[in-house]
Amino acid sequence: MLINAPSIVAGGLALLQCVLAITVSVHAVGALRLATRARNAEERDAAETARLRPVVAAVGVLVVAAASWPLLIAVLDSHVGEWPGTICIQGVTRIGERSLGSARFLPLLLDTILVTKPLLLLAAAAWVAAHAILRRAPGRSGTLGPWLLLGLGTLAAVDAVAELTYLVIPKEDDILATGCCLVAPSAFRRAGSSWLESVIPTFGAENAVVAMIVAGSLLVAALVPAACRRSSLPPLPGGVWAGVLGAGALFAILAQHVTIAVVSPAVHGIASHRCGWCVLERTTFGGLALAALAVGLGTTVVAAFAARTERYSGVADSKTSRRLARFALTGLMVAAVLAALDVI
């Protein structure tokens, strides 16, 4: 365990998140119980009141989850150089990969955190959007609100416990002695990208970049109808949003792999150096572009969920989903501009 300022702050934030998660989950269980047992207008009003009670705690989860991202990067960056062979954050993520003690869980814990944190942000943002919609449709929320709260609380607890465990376990790895990004990863870490690794050499790096640009253009074009739609009209049907999410998923996959397999070797001048973390450090606007892209893609998912909630709750307008679609478009365009500035 390395005790430094980023680790202490991250640990305190994780503890706060754990408290908020428990609070949200307890209130969600109570609201869910009332909603399932409601038989008349008075009981439904009580269930609605119980659903609205943990608003501050749920918004707190969203704020803490957003703040924990830069803190996690700061923690990982503070560990660089503390162990032999770690020349960048990518090397820190592999500490303990072949250890026999408790450190062997470090890569799995970090992989879990890298999955739960974006999911937590999406869940919290989805709940905020659903909350805004259901407030305009009192009595129609049913069990949707409580279930969302319970899922948010559970995910926040898992993320907080995983991060606290990662911070407490001693960072030990006698095997990782050279190269960091130049040493072949374990089979577990290769599994997620092995099929893309086999596609890129055949498809060609230039074609992969073109495919990424095309997928991004399709995503923007698919979002335009939702963003420009009059708010008084009902939300777009689910099939349109399915196309939006499909284009977003394809673009996210291609963008991640192009960054690691194409941009990283070009930035460092080393063909075998494929480290997305280092790209963020070596580029001027890389971190801001990634943040804007994450906001754009995440808000796209939340906008699709908001449209589905609007249809489910019986709200006659598409005010919330339209605003979210506009925000998503703004994030994507800002990311594209920042990436272009780095290329220039």
Image: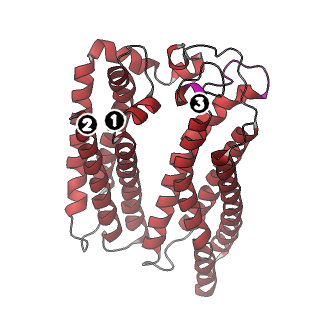
Q: How far apart in space, not on screen, are marks 2 and 1 (Cα)?
A: 6 Å
Is 174 positioned to the left or the right of 250 in the image? Answer: right
Choose mark 2 or mark 3, whichever is in front.
Answer: 3
Residue located beneath label 1 in the image? 250
What residue type is disc 1 on?
Leu
- Which residue is at a point 32% across and 74% down the rendered structure image? 316
Choose mark 1 or mark 3, whichever is in front.
Answer: 3
- Which residue is at a point 59% across and 61% down the rendered structure image? 61
- 179 vs 253, nearest the viewer: 179
Residue located beneath label 2 in the image? 215
Q: Picture coordinates of residue 117 (x, y %)?
A: 55, 47
Numbered disc 2: secondary structure: helix
Query: In the image, which residues are magenta?
Result: 91-102
Q: Quadrant of the N terminus?
A: top right
Q: Is tag 2's residue or tag 3's residue first in the polypeptide sequence?
A: 3
Is 214 positioned to the left or the right of 89 in the image? Answer: left
- 56 vs 301, nearest the viewer: 56
Residue located beneath label 3 in the image? 80
Q: Picture coordinates of residue 87 (x, y %)?
A: 54, 23
Q: Is residue 236 visible?
A: no
- Which residue is at a point 52% across and 21% down the rendered structure image? 191
Task: Please check the rendered image and state whether residue 81 is part of the magenta-colored stretch, yes or no.
Answer: no
Q: How far apart in space, not on screen, are marks 1 and 3 (Cα)?
A: 33 Å
Q: Picture coordinates of residue 20 (x, y %)?
A: 67, 63
Task: Please check the rendered image and state whether residue 92 is part of the magenta-colored stretch, yes or no.
Answer: yes
- Which residue is at a point 48% across and 53% down the rendered structure image? 122
What residue type is disc 2 on?
Ala
From this view, report whether residue 293 is shown above or below residue 302.
above
- 98 vs 277, nearest the viewer: 277
Check whether the beta carbons of the residues at disc 2 and disc 3 lie within 8 A of each other. no
Numbered disc 1: secondary structure: helix
